[in-house]
Amino acid sequence: MKVKEKNIRQKFQQLYEQSKPKPNLVRNSFRAFWTGGLICIVGEIIYDVLINLGISKVEASAFESIIMIFIGALLTGVGIYDKIGDYAGAGSVVPITGFANSIVSPAIEFKKEGFVFGVAAKMFTVAGPVLVYGITSSFILGILYYFFRW
C-alpha cells in the first residue's frame, strides 16, 4: 500500500512541476525595480515639497513617513495597492507603503468579525512580528553600542 501511495505522490509531483507556471525573472525584476523606485521618488518629492515649505529636515522626514503610510493605507483601502502589488511584486512591499499595506489588508479582510476580534486582533498579524523583532533588535543594538562605543 505504501509503495502505491509513493508512486501516486511521485506522479502528482511530476504533473505539478510540468503544469506550474514558470516566472519571467527579468520582467518581474524590472517591474519590482521601477515600481519600488517610483514609490521612492514620490516620497522624495513629498520630502522636497516639505523642505521648500520651510519645515526642518527632521520634521520633514517624520511628515514624509506619515504621509507615505497614509497613502499606502488609503490605496489599500480602495483596492488599488493590491493591483500595484500584483504587478510589481516585491517592489511594492519594500517601501514604507508596503508596511501600511501589511497592516491595513488583514484589518479589511477581517472587518466582518467585528472591531475587537476582527480589525484590532488581525491588524498586526503580519506587521506585529516585524515590529516586535525590529524594536527588540534595535534595543539590543543600542545597548551594545552604548557599552562598546569606547
Image (spheres, rainbow, N blue to C red):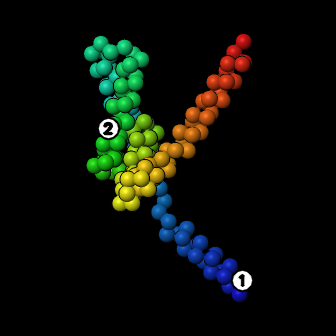
Q: Earlier in the sequence, mark 1 or mark 2?
A: 1
For the residues labelled 1 and 2, the Cα–Cα distance comes to 55 Å
Q: Is residue 18 left or right of residue 43?
A: right
Identify which residue is drawn at 31% across, 44% down. Answer: 75
For badge 2, the amino acid type reads: Ile
Task: Please give the residue where the numbered disc 2 appears in the rendered image.
Answer: 71
The disc label shown at residue 49, or none: none
**Which secondary structure lies at badge 1?**
helix
Tell me which residue sits at (61%, 35%) in the image. 136
Instruction: Please state the horizontal and vertical placement of residue 63, each as a whole percent of the image.
Output: 36, 25
Task: Kindly identify the amino acid type of the residue bearing the numbered disc 1.
Answer: Lys
The quadrant the C terminus occupies is top right
Q: Nearer the viewer, residue 113 or 44?
A: 113
Residue sitting at the far front: 116
Q: Picture coordinates of residue 22 (x, y %)?
A: 48, 59
Where residue 77 sits: x, y (%)?
Answer: 31, 48
Indicate the quadrant where residue 139 lies: top right
Asked which quadrant contains residue 93, the reply is top left
Quick check: 47 above or below 74? above
Residue holding disc 1: 2
Q: Quadrant of the N terminus?
A: bottom right
Q: Position of residue 109 (x, y in %)?
A: 38, 57
- Residue that lies at the very extreme toward the bottom in this rendered image: 1
Residue 39 shows up from this direction? no
